[in-house]
Amino acid sequence: MILALAGGVGGAKLADGLARHLPVGSLTVVVNTGDDFTPLGLHVSPDLDTVTYTLAGIANAEVGWGLAGETWNFMDALGLLGGTTWFRLGDRDLATHVERTRRLSTGESLSAITADFRARLGIAHPIHPMSDAPVRTMVDTDAGPLPFQDYFVRLRCRPIARRVWFAGIEDAGPSPGFEQALGAADLDAIVICPSNPILSVLPILDLAGVRSRLEDRRVPLIAISPIVGGKAIKGPAAKIMAELGLDASATGIAHFYGDLLDGLVVDRADTGAATAIEALGPRVLVTDTVMTSPDDRVRLARESVAFARSLAPPSLGPKSPTP
Amino acid sequence: MILALAGGVGGAKLADGLARHLPVGSLTVVVNTGDDFTPLGLHVSPDLDTVTYTLAGIANAEVGWGLAGETWNFMDALGLLGGTTWFRLGDRDLATHVERTRRLSTGESLSAITADFRARLGIAHPIHPMSDAPVRTMVDTDAGPLPFQDYFVRLRCRPIARRVWFAGIEDAGPSPGFEQALGAADLDAIVICPSNPILSVLPILDLAGVRSRLEDRRVPLIAISPIVGGKAIKGPAAKIMAELGLDASATGIAHFYGDLLDGLVVDRADTGAATAIEALGPRVLVTDTVMTSPDDRVRLARESVAFARSLAPPSLGPKSPTP
């Protein structure tokens, strides 16, 4: 079984490739919920929804979030009533948020609701929120501290990021499904999808007990670099990494994940960095990592899984650079 | 100034006629909120919205509720997620409920939100909820006690009504706008719109202090009968009146309002009842009360206002039947 850790758009694409490549029962997807928030009083889980919609085949492929063929009549009417419209919720998408909010208010867990939604949307593989406890990504900026969506959507990442932190993370443990996957006897490998390492993956790693569980793992852990040729494929990863003093490159990704990594998948554009990365510890797979078609997703998933399975489990010997 | 008391569809039509007929400053509309409820965790005020949408000229004229040109993508998506869909909320209509719910949760009053919405929708005349306190119409039936919308929409009034009561009415006083209108020095007349007397008007009359204020009034009070030829123009008024042992006729309406009425407007179909009704006390205006066109609304409003103004204020002499 492969455990995939994912954020939004890039993570969802690889998760979709994994879901198409792997048989049912061989994949568990765990998704960041640090960028969840409550615009209009509704509980919105952007990454969870992007992954769910993508795996259900109903995502808007052009923009990478929301639903295909969406309509915006709710938003138009909300604007007429003076409501807040900077976070765009489509008419169909809204059903997810309204129904999730209602069910959360009755005491159901985010995990249970997520499992029900994905089953109803015909997704066979389990998708779990990283935690059922609220974690809220905050960005300290030159314009003051900002909740993530204010920084990301309303202000379009224009403020300069000084620090990213996760409110509530101290009290948040992994969700039952995440916990179960981490301890599964048939776990083959852990795959960190090409998501923003700070905004999408770090909240997952920083959940209570997760990092030590990963350090003690007996299976290989790989990541797919979201940085290609010094640029983020999607989103503000490169800008934020640079502002936080990290190297916005495939090598920087290797530094960021450090000893956790047994392998790193980098794009052909970063072939030149492979030697330096392997000198840090992880083995490197160089391939095409930019997923523009559904076939790209499946191919990258297949290559990444084969790469991960080819690596020695961390407990069976010291990691060493390629000879 | 005319104070109009209204429920949903029929009340909204006459309120619209009054709004077109009377200059700004000469009309206050107070609307039943007993059938408010919270499907999907959202605060829905069906009568308030029907009146607001109707006066804004954006109501769905065919069905009498909701918005013209509405779309239903939210509801379709909600159905796919297993949500409750028996109460149909259109995509545009939903903005009203989501934004109202959000604003109520911040402590704003229903009155303040209603006033803001109607101003934003370009309605010049004030529209007030009957109360800012929650009142919930309950129907005891042969299928047990039911919240009004369950009885009305989900079960389509099929259960036999035994009793109607208003949960919370003991603690609910009139809204500030209603209170102000009742005490206004320039109040000319009170008009009970052709709404369901038990389901739409009784909650307004039963609010703490309202009935005694109406009994002590110094201006005429008239009603327009919602029953025409023994049938309700719209909705379940006739069925419910019969099941609760009331006479589903214009005369029954006169009995129901009793001493409150100085005048009753009845349809030409009920010409034969005029003498019996006047024998009970109120004067009778016989005219066409079925409003099928905008012109009908204005004509009925004009005739009703003229009729009300022609009546002696109750404090200036005993009511007597037509000689």
Image: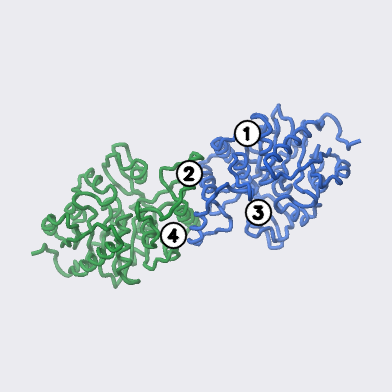
Chain colours: A blue, B green
How crowded pointer 4 is (Cα within 10 Å; few <14, some 14-19, many 20+) is rated as some
Quadrant in which the N terminus of chain A is drawn: top right
Q: Which residue is mark 4?
A: B109
Between marks 3 and 1, how big is the CA–CA gap?
A: 29 Å
Task: Tell me, yes or no, whether dots 1 and 2 are on the same chain.
Answer: no
Relative to A98, residue B258 above or below: below
- Label 3 neighbour load within 10 Å: few <14, some 14-19, many 20+: many
Above or below — where is B316 with respect to B58? below
* SS at mark 3 in the image: helix
Q: Say whether mark 4 and mark 3 are on the same chain.
A: no
| Amino acid at circle 1 | His
Q: CA distance from mark 3 to mark 2?
A: 31 Å
Judge by depth and name the residue closer to the eye, A197 or B281.
Answer: A197
Mark 1: few/some/many CA within 10 Å (<14, 14-19, 20+):
many
Q: Which mark is drawn over residue A125?
A: 1
Q: Nearer the viewer, mark 1 or mark 2?
A: 2
Q: Are marks 1 and 4 on the same chain?
A: no
- Residue farthest to the top, as pictured: A185
The mark closer to the camera, 1 or 4, is 1
The residue pinned by badge 2 equals B76
Q: Position of residue A198 (x, y in %)?
A: 73, 49
Chain ID, mark 4 = B
**Side of B80 relative to A57 (left or right):** left
Residue drawn at (20%, 47%), measured in percent from left and top?
B246
Residue B218 makes an appearance in the image? no
